[in-house]
Image (cartoon, helix red, strand yellow):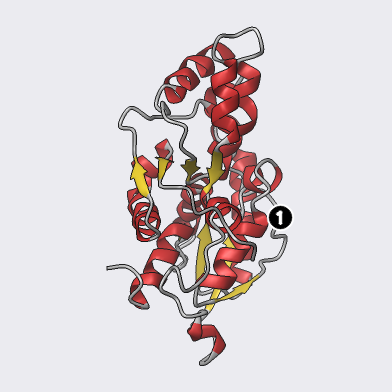
Amino acid sequence: MSSGRSDITDVYLYGTCVVDSFFPEAGVDAIEILEHLGIRVHFPQEQSCCGQPAYTSGYVDQARTVAAAQLACFKHPWPVVILSGSCGGMIKHHYVKIFDQQHPLHEKAKQVADRTFEFTEFLVDVLAVNPEQLGLSGNTSKNESGPAGKVVLHTSCAARREMNTLATGRAVVQEFIPEQLIEQPYEAECCGFGGTFSVRHGDISGAMVTDKCNNIEKSGADRLVSADCACLLNINGRMAKQNSKLQGEHLATALNRAMKSAGGVL
């Protein structure tokens, strides 16, 4: 792993509306991890939805209004760490489209896009954290006594194709999580959520998430993790409906628990 940046003292945490409403523990876990690494975390209270549902539904003007409110949250030139690949993709790749070169917010959108990072990307590619920094001694549960179980990773379509964070998500699991990472059948397939797609095309979305859940269960995994809570919301809902014992959690939650188990976080 390459040496990471040591000049970062402050970051914004963009929790996303899904984390705020359904997985608040993931936000708390991410804050504890970043603070353990000596970084001050700023959580703008004014943050809300990134505007992606409106944007992908064709309501560009409404999405622009929401996006402008998010840009106003990031007044300082600190990195913006996001707990969702899909929201990260919206801010990093689509804000500069809805605020085109003629728009007064274009330059601000471009600047924010350049310093926006998905959570695992920030840990692996920017900070280049190692097990010792997290209070994990090389993941001894894997190296000495064998893995503590099996875990499957779901990477959202946006994280995989827009943010290109499949590798960083896998690196976090392989390097820092005590369970053995295994691959589910048809691992790259969409869970069927897609924001408003799951509302507008409920039957298709339902079939897709059923396939996803069945493949996760076929993998034999004991746990499911993901860096995208929108996907987790969809998958966990279907798992519960199928009376499955599996319920997924955000990677930040899994990592923070591993650190606490090893004594890395007080």
Q: Amino acid at mark 1?
A: Ala
SS at mark 1?
loop
Q: Is residue 158 above or below residue 66?
A: below
**Residue lying furthest left in this view?**
266
Residue visible at 72% across and 60% down? 186
- Residue 79 visible (yes or no): yes
- Does 75 sit left or right of 238 as displayed? left
Q: Position of residue 55 (x, y in %)?
A: 58, 22
The answer to which quarter of the image holds residue 124 is bottom right
x%, y% of residue 151?
Answer: 55, 71
Q: Which of these two is toward me, 63 or 133? A: 133
- Front residue of this view, candidates 6 and 28: 6
Residue 236 pos. (x, y %): 47, 55
Query: Going by the picture, which residue comes out furthest to the front?
Result: 7
Rendering coords of residue 205 (x, y %) = 61, 42
Given residues 51 and 99, the one toward you in this image is: 99
* 10 Å crowding of disc 1: few (<14), some (14-19), many (20+): some
Instruction: Single out the residue that lies furthest toward the bottom.
Output: 145
The residue depicted at 38 percent of the width and 51 percent of the height is 39
Q: Is residue 214 visible?
A: no
Which residue in the protein does label 1 denote? 188
Specify the quadrant that holds the N terminus: bottom right
118 up-or-down from 178: above or below: above
Q: Residue at x 32, y 68 (%)?
A: 265
125 is higher (above) or lower (below) than 141: above
142 to the left or right of 167: left
